[in-house]
Amino acid sequence: MTETFQGTKNYVASPELLGAVNIANALQKPLLVKGEPGTGKTMLAQAVAEALGKQLIIWSVKSTTKAQDGLYVYDVVQRLYDSQFGSAGVDDIAKYIKLGKLGEAFSADEQVVLLIDEIDKADLEFPNDLLWELDRMEFYIPETKETVRAKHRPIVIITSNAEKELPDAFLRRCIFHYIAFPDPEQMEKIVRVHFDKLDETLLKQAMEAFYFLRSIDAIEKKPSTSELVDWIRALELGGIDPDRIRKEIPFAGVLLKKDKDVAAMERRLSR
Amino acid sequence: MFTGFFYLLRSRGFHVTLSEWMTLMEALTLGLHHCSLTGFYDLCRAVLVHSEADYDRFDSAFLEYFDGVPFPEDQLPEELMRWLKKPEDVMREFRAFLNTTDYESKSIEEILKKFEERLREQKEEHNGGDYWIGTQGFTEFGHSGHTPEGLRVGGQGRYRRAFKVAGERHYRDFRKDNTLDIRQFQMAFRLLRQYSSRAQGEKTEFDVDETVRKTGDKGGILDVRFKRPRKNTVKVLMLMDSGGSMEYYSNLCSMLFQAAERDNQFKELHVYYFHNCIAPSVYTQPQMRREHSVATEWVLKNFGSDYKVILVGDAMLDMYELLEKRFDWRTKEERYSGMDYLKRFKEQYPHLVWLNPEDAPVMGGLWGESYGKIAQVVDMYPLSVSGLERAMKKLLVTK
């Protein structure tokens, strides 16, 4: 593996994160990324795919997702219908086997980047059910007596919001990285990536207000990076006088989503 | 290689396994540490640590092993030992050596400035960094026969960074022994799951998947299948200390209560309140007015031994509250002391834990006596996320 990931034009990553990506890549192990919401966990996979020029396959995990769904689904109902109407090809089970995202990634002709997004949303057992498949990069379909084996080991990136503890056996197979919330310096870089040109005072004031809001303990849902970007955009479009930003925090609704939090902010501002 | 670090991590409670260690070795062979201590630190952390909650502990262990532990002298190159003992001498030698080569004096000065800075730093921290500055710096220029790899010496700023990063302990807040929020309590409560087993019980739930599959297999002739339902069968009885010294922890307790309540994942959850220790009456409300009272006997009679019992309290009370027989206005008798009730609970409920928001008192302290007495009877866990997790695991096993 010669390619190394250096971040992209649109994605600013810390050196530690770059290191972790490259370690995982070189060791051919899945990279597990944790971090506060809005720290760009999902974006990372897109950036990696873009930077390495590979196709990105996203497996978005939901609370009802089963490990099996990622491998393949045997569409029995369709087969039943077809059999009743005497369609051709009912004998061919393979026709009713639909590969899931993991299956897709394995059978791709080129190396792909596979993002398993928010793995902690699924049942507690979910990660364990994938151990073998992620380890060996293959799985067996009993219906067709076929083994799907990865032609090119995909680069696997897994994100988690820490809603559930992941099992140890699973963790042991992963390279782990925790994306810390960006410090103002890093944040400035990130914001600049999103804007071609930006009024310096506006940026400075907005950043100050943003970190001020994050420092208020009473605020439960702290604003995140993507909200900051949206907010700056709103401030720009709204033509707000930059000098008012820090004092009044206009359009606070973009940053704070709970009534309680807005109230907490107002209490602090009126002091 | 660094096997001592492996055992240190294990002794610090990291469940590092051999396979992870081999992964690390493989990574080192591949040169993924980029020949720097920072790289090595990042690599170790990425491979061996699997939760940001452990970052802090890892940092301490890393510092402990690579920063403080004196290395056996015979492992160090002789030159290095000489340098470590008398850095100034080597410094002079090094300067003289550089002057003999036709190096631009400017770059020499730069290098030396950095080198001197490094030396100064080293005096400030006694053990700190000696080794790494030593070996790394020295192996670079020592090994290659003093060829002006002196720049590498300057490069040590990087080596030091790992210690800096580790030393700053950025991740202290993530430690699991902090008490955090409801969500984390909820996650801990999730551990308390015991599914009705698949092997027992009636098949009462319509199994759509299996029915479709079997029907499909039979070419469309309906074959209805049922399965055994899978539900959490855990029933919880929670008794919380309220008022008095517990006021201080009311927030924490209400979080715990909400976490248990909100999750709604237990088959049953019953909450009662008591003051200091279980007395003849417990209460349905934390205000503990008489109209809320319920006889403890009633509780014992109505909740069978299959309930898992969680007691929450600081276990700090006067010994008389614990040992004197308490008056029961219902029976007009004094039959059981707080301790007796605890023992009766313990007898009736094999799954019983005590969660304590207070740290264990120093032995012999004012309240230490009652704490110790109670801890002899019931298993006590701190009311933190990791304490709760351990308690929940305890509740699941029969012992």
Image (cartoon, helix red, strand yellow):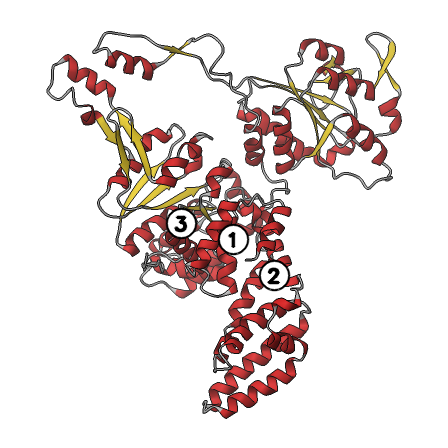
Query: Disc 2 or disc 1, which is closer to the eye?
Result: 2
Task: Inspect the image, locate mark 2, and give the three-letter code of the amino acid beneath it.
Answer: Phe
Question: Residue under circle 1?
Answer: B45
- Do tag 2 and tag 3 residues touch (Cβ < 8 Å)? no
Q: Nearer the viewer, residue A119 or A222?
A: A119
- Label 2 – label 3 distance at C-alpha: 33 Å
Disc 3 on helix, strand or loop?
A: loop
Task: Inspect the image, locate mark 3, and give the three-letter code of the amino acid beneath it.
Answer: Gly
For the residues beneath circles 2 and 1, the answer to whether they share a chain is: yes
Residue found 50% across the figure and 80% down from its top: B145
In the image, residue B397 sits, relative to residue B118, either above or below, namely above
Q: In this view, does A167 lie to the left or right of A23?
A: right
Visible residue check, residue A177: no
Q: Where is residue B157 in the image (x, y as percent from the top left)?
A: 53, 71
> Which mark, residue B30?
none
Task: Inspect the image, locate mark 1, and give the three-letter code of the amino acid beneath it.
Answer: Arg
- Chain to which the residue tagged by mark 1 belongs: B
- Label 3 – label 1 distance at C-alpha: 20 Å
Asked where in the image residue B112 lies, by quadrant, the reply is bottom right
> Which mark, residue A40?
3
Residue found 67% across the figure and 12% down from its top: B303
> Which mark, residue B66?
2
